[in-house]
Image (cartoon, grey):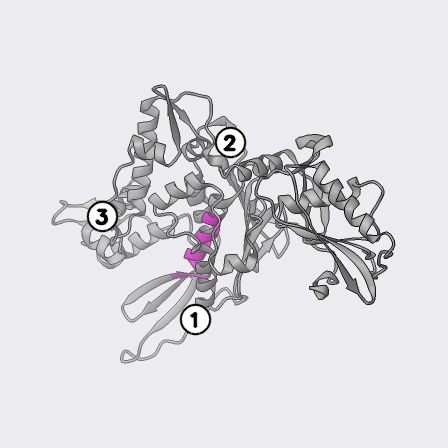
């Protein structure tokens, strides 16, 4: 324990040379510790040099009483400190331990909740900003921002349209092995806290509006995507900002990345297998994690940045006080937006709680990539997925017919999503293939295949020649 006290100031340790006559100088830190993960204030150590000066035996017990009374009388809700006297290198210091509070927000009574709420950021104590105060209030009441009910009344028709969109997207994402998708009912919407029923009127929550994507209230909650030249943000090549429903933003951002990373074609004998330079499941998980777990109280947009050496996804909002980088790597999940998470699970966007980051790490390892970097930036969270530093074009030698032939070339996706490309590859190999056969080959649902077939037909990329039973698919353009 004594060794821990001398490690230097941090998010959980604060040094004071002596107990100041104005208690406000340490009460702010007491409040910050209670609003966070707890911490210790050590009186009798110089902060810059970590030199132990100690406190005189004649006054040390009076000092302990003064600190105890100041904390108890000045903080709201009440904080009960654990105070001890420790001896370090023959000198006595006072250690005031503040436990993590369960009734956030804690604040200094005479300053009031707005001016008197403080947070710990690294080794400094800062006044909580308005959005941070709101998060503390929600945390103290065990509620999430996306479940807050709004005052506007919405019609049954609007709710039905919303449910149909969720069902359509859930069906599109359904895997072949999944059970049939059930349509979302009104009671399900209430259970998920997407709407609330009061006196035969229906009121939306923030989650409803974020998922619907039509409200002016959330115009700033978008995803910014950019490709930069080099390893810094000094020169950008292209950029785009995606708006609308948060699940559509997610898809758009995901496809943006796929369009700007290298796609390799590996031909093994008679078969062609496409693969990207980065694992696509990891890319998707990074963006899903940002959308699902970002703070919608924190100002700022999700940023997806592609550099020469890495893909970087940054989401607004500090990590929960119980969550650390190591715990995230092990699969700990602290759901910030509970209703959004339930809808994403229904839509097959997320699979199971806490599996996202471990999957990103696993996918990167299987690809032979450097371990992704997880960065807690205080008010933001960032994941870096590193690219391989290889040449852009690689070709292997071709051997005789009796040996296996493998050729790898790098190309760009040219506007198609990976799903589009998968369907086109099947059509190129087997033009007479039925939609059911495509579904089996891709491990998709038939409905999902129909969606992409119709999409490619609308874009005039493919056309049907002949009847549905005896005809075939023809690729009429090659982009």
**Above or below: residue 402 compared with residue 216:** below
Residue 201: which disc? Answer: none
State the SS at label 2: helix
Give the quadrant of residue 375: bottom right
Residue at horizontal 35%, vertical 25%? 158
Nearer to the camera, 414 or 389: 389
Q: Position of residue 238 (x, y in %)?
A: 55, 46
Specify whether residue 283 is painted magenta: yes
Horizontal side, residue 447 vs residue 307: left or right: left
**Between marks 3 and 1 in the image, the one whose residue lies nearer the viewer:** 3
> Which callout, 3 or 1, points at the residue further toward the start of the chain?
1
Residue 395: which disc? Answer: 1
Q: Main secondary structure of the magenta part?
A: helix
Instruction: Give, as a single range, the part of the protein colored magenta.
Output: 275-289
Q: How dense is the environment of label 1, judged by Cα within 10 Å: few (below 14), some, or many (20 and up)?
A: few
Can the viewer see residue 50? no
| Structural distance between the alpha carbons of marks 3 and 2 | 35 Å
Horizontal side, residue 91 vs residue 275: left or right: right
**Above or below: residue 58 compared with residue 300:** below
**Which residue position is annotated with label 2?**
218
**Which residue position is annotated with label 3?**
446
């Amino acid at each position: 324990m004594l060794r821990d006290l001398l490690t230097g100031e941090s998010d959980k340790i604060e040094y004071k040379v002596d107990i100041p006559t104005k208690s406000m100088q340490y009460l702010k830190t007491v409040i910050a510790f209670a609003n966070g993960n707890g911490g210790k204030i050590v009186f009798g150590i110089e902060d810059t040099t970590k030199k132990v000066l100690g406190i005189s035996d004649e006054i040390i017990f009076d000092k302990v009483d003064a600190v105890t009374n100041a904390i108890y009388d000045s903080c709201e809700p009440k904080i009960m400190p654990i105070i001890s006297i420790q001896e370090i290198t023959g000198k006595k210091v006072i250690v005031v331990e503040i436990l993590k509070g369960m009734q956030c927000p804690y604040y200094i009574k005479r300053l009031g909740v707005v001016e008197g709420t403080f947070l710990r950021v690294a080794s400094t104590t800062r006044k909580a900003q308005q959005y941070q105060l709101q998060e503390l209030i929600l945390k103290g009441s065990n509620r999430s921002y996306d479940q807050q009910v709004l005052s506007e009344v919405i019609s049954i028709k609007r709710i039905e349209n919303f449910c149909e969109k969720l069902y359509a997207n859930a069906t599109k994402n359904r895997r072949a092995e999944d059970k049939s998708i059930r349509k979302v009912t009104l009671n399900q919407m209430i259970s998920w806290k997407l709407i609330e029923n009061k006196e035969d009127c229906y009121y939306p929550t923030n989650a409803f509006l974020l998922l619907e994507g039509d409200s002016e209230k959330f115009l700033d909650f978008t995803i910014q995507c950019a490709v930069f030249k080099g390893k810094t943000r000094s020169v950008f090549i292209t950029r785009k900002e995606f708006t609308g429903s948060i699940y559509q933003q997610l898809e758009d951002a995901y496809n943006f990345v796929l369009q700007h990373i290298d796609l390799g074609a590996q031909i093994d004998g008679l078969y062609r297998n496409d693969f990207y330079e980065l694992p696509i499941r990891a890319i998707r998980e990074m963006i899903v994690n940002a959308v699902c777990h970002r703070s919608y109280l924190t100002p700022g947009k999700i940023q997806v940045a592609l550099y020469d050496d890495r893909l970087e996804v940054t989401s607004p909002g500090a990590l929960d006080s119980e969550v650390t980088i190591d715990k995230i790597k092990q699969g700990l999940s602290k759901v910030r937006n509970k209703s959004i998470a339930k809808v994403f699970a229904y839509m097959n966007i997320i699979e199971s709680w806490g599996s996202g980051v471990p999957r990103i790490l696993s996918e990167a390892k299987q690809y032979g990539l450097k371990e992704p970097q997880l960065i807690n930036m205080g008010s933001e969270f960032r994941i870096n997925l590193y690219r391989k530093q290889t040449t852009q074009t690689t070709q292997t030698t071709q051997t005789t017919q009796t040996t296996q032939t493998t050729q790898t070339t790098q190309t760009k996706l040219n506007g198609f999503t990976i799903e589009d490309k998968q369907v086109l590859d099947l059509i190129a190999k087997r033009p007479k293939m039925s939609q059911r056969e495509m579904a089996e080959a891709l491990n998709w649902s038939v409905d999902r295949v129909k969606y992409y077939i119709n999409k490619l037909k609308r874009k005039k990329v493919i056309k049907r020649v002949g009847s549905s039973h005896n005809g075939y698919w023809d690729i009429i353009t090659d982009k």
